[in-house]
Image (cartoon, grey):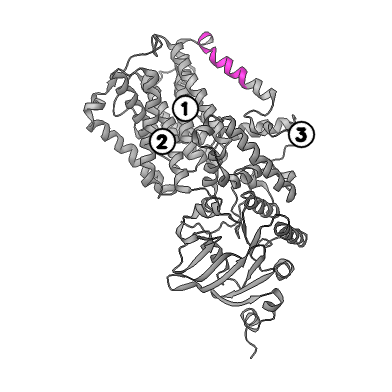
Amino acid sequence: MSLLEYENVTLKFGGLTAVDNLSFDVQEGEVFAIVGPNGAGKSTVFNLISRFYDPYAGSIQFDGHDLLRVKASAVAAFGVARTFQNIELFEHATVLQNLLVGRHRHRRTNLISEILFTPSARRQEIENREKIEEIIDFLDLQAFRDKMISGLPYGVRKVVEVARALATEPKLLLLDEPASGLSVEETTDMRWWIDDIRRQMGITVLMVEHDMGLVSGVSDRVLAMADGAKLALGTPAEVQSHPAVIEAYLGKAS
Amino acid sequence: MRIVFKTNYMQDLRPWKDGYQLGLYLILLAVAAAAPWWLDDFYLGELTNVLIWAIAGLGLMILTGHTGQASLGHAAFLAVGCYANVVMIEAGVPFLVAFPVAGLLTGIVGATVAIPALRLHGIYLAIFTLALSVLMDDIIVLAEPITGGVAGKYLGGVEIFGHLVDRWATPSQFFWLVLAVAIIVTLGYINLLRSSLGRSFIAVRDSEVSAQAMGVDIARTKTISFALSCAVTGLAGALMGLFAGAFNNETFSVVISIQLLMMIVIGGLGSIHGAFLGAIVIGFLPQFLSISKEYAAALLGGNAVAIPGLEFGIFGMILIAFILFEPMGLYGRWLKIRTWFELFPFYRKDMFKRQKSYLKTERLR
């Protein structure tokens, strides 16, 4: 069953067509990668799912919900979590606080019970913490719990962002260039984590990535884009050898 | 250096780190509560004033320090709280009812103001709220039947369970009332910060895009922050009215708004301690200046001359000095000094230096 369905989506910024009549679907339980040259509209595909923009035409369905009918903050409530290409963490907060914000969609307390910190608020906080600790264990973040984000190295921030997305307990995880700026070792770690996120946690992963090693290593299907349009869709090997993809990256042989 | 060995989650949840820290705060509280016995009436009044400013500072801290929305108009909400309280008391409502209702009313006014203010960011929001502060002056004059207009209002003491609580007649009772309000507000603030809503405030402050992606409703969160901030400020305003005794449209001027904002910047944005430390500076600086002026006059052998605008000039210079040399405020400075002692001799110069942050995703505004 397809979890996410993109149907004939078009987005224009003035005269520029960022996403051009794009259709694809992500099946439950798969790792789906989007590749393409810079400016192909990959991140825009994510931002449309996050409801940062309204598409010009088309529809986006997630798990039976029409995403275009809800506001941005409601998308997370359906079970969509994401990371950002340029890391959008809460800089002046600790790693723990960052991860706990990820628990926001499971909030059951209200203003009054929080200001009084009633037993129910306390219970919820402890539950949140237990969930967070599982994720900290999973991603080896134990050493950074009480560290401020503003003092952390880039590689750790990248992992904290994945952790924060996992803290929401999503059905679909959107990873925007999870390996950009990471060292070879860190990229390998990321590869195993993505594999585990899918296998152990049963979370469907949709990612944008330039590192073809990572893409062919973990993904089941790949969508290649150029200038907002679909070039090819298939297994990593199929896409890599597709003539249109080679042309988009390397140009025409003449 | 004390290292707290954590064995359960409650240790991270409760407001104090360990018994030692809890003990320190309890001693501080006991010393403060005993102030009427070790301070004369003049300084007790000054201390009361500082505490009232600290409550107002806590109010603004919610909005500016934790939600990241600058406000130059909080004097307007002080006025709303003050007048609401007085009008109700004059109508015969007992103080213990009128006081929280005044806070609630100010909160509702704040939430209403938040709806148009939500669309504004940074400097535009500051100007919007500044305009609000200016407007409030005129509104008070125009609403003369309620507010007494330019002539203003006068309020003597109030009665709580048959006890007269008045700034002049029973200064210690009034001090305890203010201290109790300050403690209650601080505890509520601490609770807020350790639960979901407080974290979503911080999330909105640091990155609206990713707060949204985590399911935080930005508009709603900002409105709640505005409302809470204004409610607390309204409580401070009500106390300020009681403290001043007499007030009119000029009592809560734009200058008060600016002082409030300066106070939390000097104290340290984004910390509860900051509101209190800033209030101490703002509250005691005028006294400190006049005392040192007399001292200087005695030393140089002349008359103490009143220099108009000296106070604000010095406030301004202090603010500039803080922004340049200690953007984390007094509380940040204190943290550094403490860390220096705790880690001696291993403190490094750039320990608190913030790394240049990486390119942010284009703000989707």
Query: In terms of image quadrants, where is residue B87?
Result: top left
Farthest residue toward the front? Answer: A1
Q: Looking at the rendered structure, which numbered label has been put on residue B55? A: 1
Q: Which residue is located at x 62 percent, y 86 percent?
A: A252
Label 2 element class = helix
| Same chain? Circles 2 and 3 | yes
Query: Is the residue at mark 1 from the same chain as the one at mark 3?
Result: yes
Instruction: Using the image, determine if residue A106 lies above or below residue B282.
Output: below
Q: Please say if B250 is above or below A228.
A: above
Q: Is residue B29 magenta?
A: yes
Q: Nearer the viewer, mark 2 or mark 3?
A: 2
Name the residue located 76 percent from the left edge and 34 percent from the top edge.
Answer: B345
Q: Which amino acid type corresponds to the residue marked 2 in the rendered image?
A: Ile
Q: Which contiguous range is marked in magenta? A: B25-37
Q: Position of residue B267 (x, y in %)?
A: 53, 32
Q: Is residue B200 visible?
A: yes
Residue at disc 3, secondary structure: loop
